[in-house]
Image: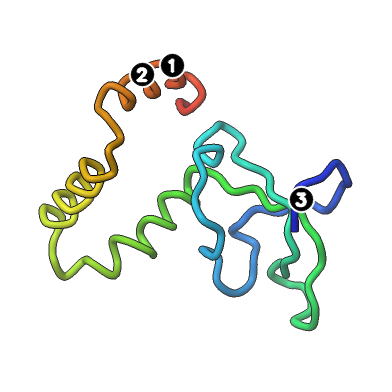
Amino acid sequence: MNNSTQSFPVVSWRELQGNKYIKAIDPGMLIKGGLPYIMKARAIGTSRHGSEPVTVIFDKEYVEKWITAKLIRPLSNYGVDYVTNLVTQAWINSNYSLESLIADSTKSLEKYEE
């Protein structure tokens, strides 16, 4: 479901039933107040039959929990040093330059700080 100007009930990702980490992470989730996304979902305490369109707010905590569920937990047997090195190597192999990282971080640091 795409985002539009239509108004739907607003819920936090914490209130969703089922797999809370189905939505891919997005840099907008790190902005103070989070990223609103319109989707069909069931909030905790609502009927299990059918889902309704709602505006779900995904925030920094969602990104942290997503990383834990999708990366850290599955690779935890390898230890923090191995996983950190793996992520570093993936970053290097992605060809995302250090200069780009520094420029992006410097340019938009204010919006990520709470």
Looking at the image, is mark 1 or mark 3 earlier in the sequence?
3
The amino acid type found where label 3 is placed reads Val
Residue where numbered disc 2 is placed: 103
Contact flag, marks 2 and 1 (Cβ < 8 Å)? yes
How many discs appear? 3
Contact flag, marks 2 and 3 (Cβ < 8 Å)? no
Which residue is drawn at the image coordinates 42% and 21% (left, top)? 109
Badge 3, how many Cα within 10 Å: few under 14, some, many 20+?
some
As drawn, 63 above or below 95: below
The amino acid type found where label 2 is placed reads Ala
Q: Position of residue 23 (x, y in %)?
A: 56, 59
In the displayed structure, does residue 88 sit left or right of residue 55?
left
In the displayed structure, does residue 25 sit left or right of residue 105?
right
Residue 10 circle label: 3
Badge 1, how many Cα within 10 Å: few under 14, some, many 20+?
few
CA gap between label 2 and label 1 equals 6 Å
The image quadrant that residue 107 belongs to is top left
Which residue is drawn at the image coordinates 38% and 64% (left, top)? 69
Q: Position of residue 18 (x, y in %)?
A: 59, 74
The image quadrant that residue 93 belongs to is top left
Camera-near label (2 vs 3) is 2
Name the element at disc 1. helix
As drawn, 73 above or below 63: below
The amino acid type found where label 1 is placed reads Lys
Residue where numbered disc 1 is placed: 107
CA gap between label 1 and label 3 equals 30 Å
Which residue is drawn at the image coordinates 28% and 44% (left, top)? 94
Name the element at disc 2. helix
CA gap between label 2 and label 3 equals 34 Å
Q: Nearer the viewer, residue 8 or 85?
A: 85
Quarter of the figure that contains the N terminus: bottom right
Residue 90 circle label: none
